[in-house]
Image: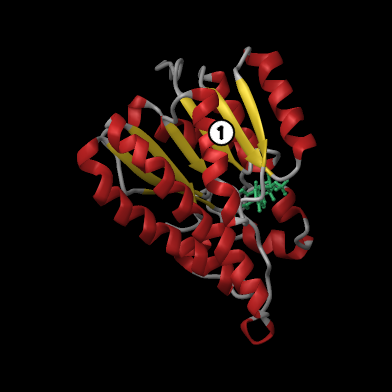
Amino acid sequence: MVKIDLQDKVAVVTGAGRGIGKAIAQSLAQAGAKLALIARTQSQLESVAQELRDKYSAQVAVFPVDLGDEAQIEPLFEEIYSQFGKIDILVNNAGITRDGLLMRMKDEDWDTVLNLNLRSIFLMVRTVSKRMLKARAGKIINISSVVGILGNPGQANYCAAKAGLIGFSKSVAKELASRGITVNVVAPGFIETDMTEKMSDKAKEAILSQVPLNRHGQPQDVAQAVLFLASPLADYLTGQVLCVDGGMAM
Ligand code: NAP
């Protein structure tokens, strides 16, 4: 079996307080990475960090920050650089939904989702890539969604952001490739987390009927794909969209 070793690597994971981000943090910590965890809820971050320290003796710091607040992003990354010295891996996982049919969608629901799910990622990637360019290395992994490829009624804002993230990632992958930086996208299908918990059983069953592997995804399914993309095993891979969806979008 190939062992993924991320000793001495510093990884930033956004939205790491629960769900997919928490599972990503666990996978990266298990592989030996040092971690900077970001989300708004400090208590959730602290509990994830403690678990990673206890289980993997990981070096972990938490940063309770609202990434929807643009003014916080530069100081946040300055702080991460001052604590860790570098960032090797950036996983942009934090995301939200504000669902509603087009005719009823409020401007605010559009703006809030586009701001966090797309604009904040542009700001973070721009900030981090400056130092990655100097280091001539870096791995950026952006978490999109299969609905960014397929579309989904009631999620025009979310799908626009997630589709935009794919175009953004491919463009940046082309810009940064000559300096050894890779930029890839993971597009999950239906994953059992707080985000999908609120859906009705009927809606969940309807989705399951479209999943060839016939089960709902777990956060670990996504985390394993991220771990691969963050590792040297994926050194010759950039600008790709890896759908972790049980075959839903093939
Ligand atoms: P989740 O359980 O709702 O967790 C979202 C994480 O993002 C939380 O840690 C949350 O923490 C953080 N977050 C939300 N708003 C934030 C903000 N303004 N600033 C900083 N952090 C913020 O969601 P999930 O299901 O794990 O989803 C993770 C990612 O996968 C998202 O990008 C989502 O769009 C994508 N995805 C999920 C699915 C799925 O089926 N679950 C499918 C496709 C794609 P706080 O609330 O404490 O800030």
Tell me where residue 167 appears, x and y as whole percent: 36, 61
Taking depth in this image into account, of 173 and 244 the one nearest to the observer is: 173
Question: In the figure, is residue 139 to the left or right of 194?
Answer: left
Is residue 149 toward the left or the right of residue 48 in the image? left
| Disc 1 residue type (three-letter) | Glu
Task: Give the left or right position of residue 181, taking residue 76 as reference.
Answer: left
Is residue 68 or residue 75 the one in the foreground?
Answer: 75
Scheme of image coloration: secondary structure
For the point 56% across and 54% down, the residue is 211
Residue farthest along the left direction in this orientation: 178
* Residue 133 occupies quadrant: top left
| Residue linked to disc 1 | 79
Task: Estimate the x, y position of residue 47 in percent, counting from the top left.
Answer: 76, 28
Q: Residues within 10 Å of mark 1 (few under 14, many from 20)?
A: few
* Disc 1, SS: helix
85, 50: nearer the viewer = 85
Task: Using residue 78 as the reference point, say whether residue 19 is left or right of it.
Answer: right
**x and y, in percent, of residue 51 in the image:** 72, 22
Picture quarter with the C terminus? bottom left
Q: How many numbered dots are placed on residues in this image?
A: 1
Ligand 1 under 8 Å from disc 1 Cβ: no
Against 164, is 84 above or below? above
